[in-house]
Image (cartoon, rainbow, N blue to C red):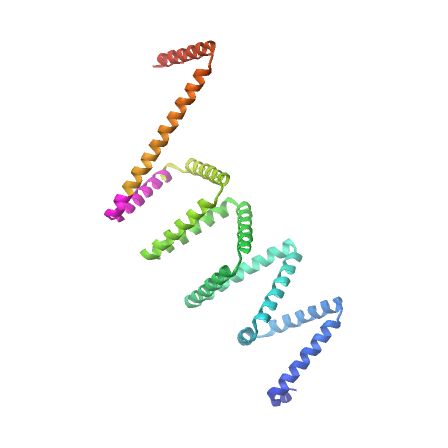
Amino acid sequence: MRNVRSQESAEERAHRLNSMRVSASTSRANESSPEREMRLAADGARRATYRASQSSSQRELRLTIDREQHVLSREAETASQRELRLTADRERHTLSRESETNTERELRLTADGERHVLFCESETFTERELLLTADRERHTLSRESETYTERELRLTADRERHVLFRESETFTERELRLTADRERHVPSCESETYTERELRLSADRERHTLSRESETYTERELRLTADRERHILSRESETFTQYEDRLTNDRVHHNIIRSLDDEHEHKQRLESGREYYNSLRQERLISLSNERLRIENIRSLETDEQREARLTADRFRHSQKKKKI
């Protein structure tokens, strides 16, 4: 057989492969569900036996050939074939996820995590950069091609998954996650240039502004309430040392920002501060004026008996204050 295969021409090989595909398709179409399951089980067992018996060199050769075949197959397929393949993959992926039990899901996620860690440890810096660049490009293309509805559905699903993940993590897991985030955040900020930092801050401000403009009054109140509660809990749980460290860091950060200001920025900051102070003062005056009007309206509507009772209560409260003094 090997001699015959080695002597056949390209046309004969193509004809043979095409005949085998037709024969396989006909056989697949006629087989029942039990026959299909038995065939797949036998194929899996035969593949596992073959994989277990091959050496490291044979495995590397096989993987290399598989990658080359995979690349050639992807390059040769048309846009329609690619869409059909991706659709079939998604459907098969969805069915597989829906049919797996909780134990199977946990085992799969654990295996994926271990394989991911091993892959990240074995890749070189160049491979990692190429991978990240390809991921960013694919991510950008995916975001640009999605519709508004698809984007909203994706963001909603991300938020729900994010909330579920946060609710299920323990205190230790949360602390480890926050610590890892801080450690990753610090080197990232230290390695960025001044231009990159300005671009990042500008993008953050724009995104922050858009988020604030699009939220409703109820969403704003809920956000502010949650921020206040989280702020209070954070202040109550910090030790005196943490309190001093926080104030010191705030002062250092404040001084650095002030030292980086040029004359124009300094004037703008002072002007903004004055405007903010004047707006607060104006709001305070308006609030006091409204309070006086409210009190005057209440006083104008009270009867003589109510007025006497109020004055008596005021005198009593005043006398109690004098006794304490």
How many labels were placed on the picture?
0
In the depicted structure, whether residue 113 falls above or below residue 177: below
Task: Mark yes or no: residue 7 visible.
Answer: yes
187 left or right of 174? left
Magenta residues span 242-268
Residue visible at 42% across and 20% down in the picture: 295
Residue 118 or residue 133, whichever sits in front:
133
Image spot of residue 292 (x, y percent): 39, 22
Q: Is residue 245 magenta?
A: yes
In the depicted structure, whether residue 256 falls above or below residue 111: above
Residue 301 or residue 72, whichever sits in front:
301
Q: Is residue 168 magenta?
A: no
Residue 315 or residue 42, whichever sits in front:
315
In the depicted structure, whether residue 305 falls above or below residue 23: above
Task: Mark yes or no: residue 5 visible.
Answer: no
Within the image, what quadrant is residue 258 found in?
Answer: top left
| Quadrant of the drawing holding the N terminus | bottom right
Image spot of residue 174 (x, y percent): 49, 47
Image spot of residue 85 (x, y percent): 60, 68
Which residue is farthest left?
Answer: 263
Residue visible at 34% across and 41% down in the picture: 245
Within the image, what quadrant is residue 325 found in?
Answer: top left
**Main SS of the magenta segment?**
helix
Image spot of residue 11 (x, y percent): 62, 87
Residue visible at 65% across and 60% down in the picture: 95
Residue visible at 43% across and 51% down in the picture: 181
In the depicted structure, whether residue 66 falls above or below residue 309: below
